[in-house]
Image (cartoon, helix red, strand yellow):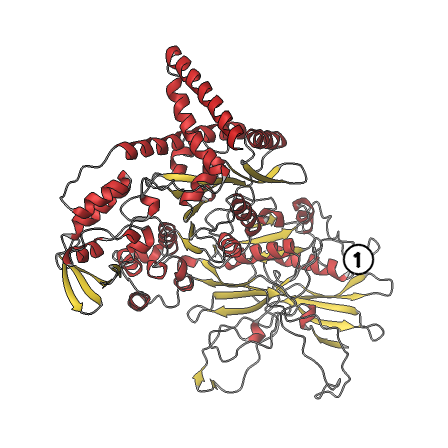
Amino acid sequence: MENPSSDDEGSLRDNNVDLNDATLVDPHQLELEVTAQLTEPIPISTDPFSTSEQPKTINSSPVEPFIGMEFESEEDAKLFYMAYASRVGFSVRISKSRRSRNDESIIMRRFVCSKEGFHLKKSGDLDEGKKKRKRATIREGCKAMIEVIQKYYGRWVVSKLVKEHNHIVEPPSRVRFVAPEEYAHADPYLGMEFSSHEAAQTFYYAYASRVGFDVRIRLSRRSTKDESFVMRRFVCTKEGFTPSEENGEDVATGKKKRSRTPAREGCKAMFEVIKKEFDKWIVSKLVLDHTHELAVMPSKVHYIQSQSEVVVLSKTSGEQLGMLNNGAKTAAYDNNIPLWNETKLPQNFSFNVDDTQKLLGYFKRMNGENNTFSYAYRVDNNNCLTHAFWADVRARGSYYYFGDAVTLDTDFKADSNMLPFVMLTGVNHHFQSILFGCGLLVDQSEESFVWLLENWITSMGAHHPASLKTVHDEALSTAVSSVFPETRHRFCLNDMFNKCAERLANMYSLYPSFEEEFKNAINRPESVEEFEFSWNSLLEKYDLGNNIWIQYLYSIRGKWVPAFLKGTFTAELPDLKPESLREVLFNKYFNIKTPLPVFITLLDQAMVGWSERESLEDLAASFTKPILNFPSNLLKQVSEVYTRAAYNIFEKEFIDSLGYHVEKIEDGLVGKFKVIKDGAGASTTTTITRMVSCDFSDKRVRCSCGKFEECGILCRHILRVYLMVDVRSLPEFYVVKRWTKDAKSGFVLDEVLRFNNLYRDAVRFAKEGSTSDEVFNLAQQHLQLAYAEVVNVKQRYG
């Protein structure tokens, strides 16, 4: 009994295609190309007693199919013909199959050229009032085919063969072998870019092979201009459901139907790429979760064919595949050509056993000296380091006082020469960068980031930060949401703008004013409504409504657009950027050539230096006061409590407030004011307007700019209103302790914090006391006396 191949046998025809979409490929045009079938390469067996003309040996020249050629299995025949097709220059699909009436096993397969047959003509040119566009003819009645049947002795024999094509075939310029392991550190994500849809296909097939499922092509869409592909959707082979057969009888023929085992289970996993500007292909839809169990796939083969080359994706060695694919102009590995336009894959970096043991020795030594030193680590099966985290007393003490706003620094991912070193940093009361903890992550997966963040927050005392800033990264974003559900996660705005410059490079080059307009649409709106208006205006002006990257940016707007982050404490100021720890440390020393013990030593020395800088600023703030450049009770009050850095910021806001004028727009217990500055910016016509409300009962104010909520220092607009309503002293609740000289005073809840303060003083004492022999002797004498007194007090009070 002959019948067209069903879906579970490899056909890509899908009955769920939306036929009303004029841009979709006709479902009858969806074919099984050589890329859509996975096969296992097993050596070809030919019959030595066959009277038919024998081809030359595999090793000397290409193997040609011939009548009577035998194979061990149907899969062997399929693999051979697909390899032959990729070498000659055409694609293959399964046309027909025949099953045994005894056990329903397949006993015949017919593989044909993808241009075999003709497209079915459909009645009517209109569908629900829409005119259908004419499509390019993909099938041209080609007769090329091979048919294999199973003989009684179990082997499969070529029974029919047509080699001639009625269209032009052109062999690829090369064959490139790719192993799935080459993508072992790459997982798909929305916005991922590829140089072609074949490259995307290669990547997803490799990913599927590694994770443990099989893939088929679900949908394609072609351009209305030149019929080239503009969309490809790849799904798990268990996507959808096998159509149920209720009556068990074919209505048209009256023949009884066979019941088949359902091969589809409604799995939603899919991977869709669409063609964008400059022939880039971008992942527009992605579902990673499967509804069924995944299993390790056997060694299989994909042939991904394009106009210029054939990519053979297999776990089998290139030499064995080269024998099967014999005759192509090039059959060597070519791993230097990127398959997609990714920023950079995680580097193939690992620590050796010696480095691992030395690092663990350092951890144990530090913990032995002070049991408040926290560390955690992981090793692989070879006892080589894969994950590490550590935080000393300085980091834990700093987090206690200034851990309200944290930055997770993973900049090493952008530079393959850097060690995979992760830093958790913040800002102290002197606007200096401080360290909250360190990590080494060879694998930058979601699970790795979860491990790091969980160990870090445990060592910090489980007090979660108010905000956490990271670069834009899907794995990292998911990890942060998992570990810190109540923390406001935000993406670095500069990082987002840099990514936009890459993804929208064509817009930046075509329209010189686009970059400025784009940034203004992001930075200027003070409310969600204003942002929505400016965003939509920009999209309408430049016709970006269908741009996938723009759509993705909008979907995550809550994590990077300033208007959505109002009220989130960040301890950041637009005009002041603390010196980056990474810029100071990494640019000079820490690359992959630096031995790990040297890295740790240099890091410790650098951290001591940074701690000393903070101590020196503490000392200066305690014994000096800033010079008042303007007579004001507010400035005098602030100068006595704020650190020098915080006072300078406040003073600048106060002086700048004098350039604004105020209009009272509403009276009452809560007054409302409009604070205006004319002629701001490069254009004298630019006007800055902010809305300030003031509760006269307790002098609480709120400005539309939201600066106080973000950094803890009053903005110029509120200060201008205070001047107008004659507020001469700053209310107590607007003097944020984290910016004061006493930021680190008060009741200390943890021995770690007391140790941290003494440690800073001891470092300063040791530095000054070692300058000469005389000073050293005096310092040691006083230190011994102080130590004896401390021990005496400890014994007396327990």
Q: Quadrant of the C terminus?
A: top right
Q: Disc 1 residue type?
A: Glu
Q: Is residue 546 above or below residue 282?
A: below
**Where does the image place residue 586, in percent across and percent down from the top left?**
43, 34
Tell me the residue that label 1 is attached to. Answer: 72
Going by the image, does 545 lie left or right of 34?
Answer: left
Image quarter for residue 742? top left
**Where does the image place residue 119, in percent across and percent down from the top left?**
57, 77
Q: Is residue 38 above or below residue 139?
A: above
Looking at the picture, tell me which residue is in the foreground, 354 or 480. Answer: 480
Going by the image, does 564 lie left or right of 728?
Answer: right
Does residue 595 appear in this view?
no
Image quarter for residue 519? bottom left
What residue appears at the point 17 percent right and 68 percent down from the top-left corner?
A: 665
Looking at the picture, tell me which residue is in the foreground, 678 or 88. Answer: 678
Does residue 116 appear in this view?
yes
Image quarter for residue 170? bottom right
Q: Quadrant of the N terminus?
A: bottom right
Q: Is residue 499 above or below residue 596?
A: below
What residue appears at the point 69 percent right and 51 percent down from the top-left corner?
A: 324
Tag 1, which secondary structure? Answer: loop
Looking at the picture, tell me which residue is in the foreground, 285 or 163. Answer: 285
Going by the image, does 264 lie left or right of 597?
Answer: right
Going by the image, does 555 lie left or right of 578?
Answer: right
Residue that extends furthest to the top in the rendered view of this protein = 773
**Where does the image place residue 516, in percent across and percent down from the top left?**
26, 56
**Where does the image place residue 27, in percent across and percent down from the top left?**
57, 75
Residue that extends furthest to the front in the rendered view of this protein = 796
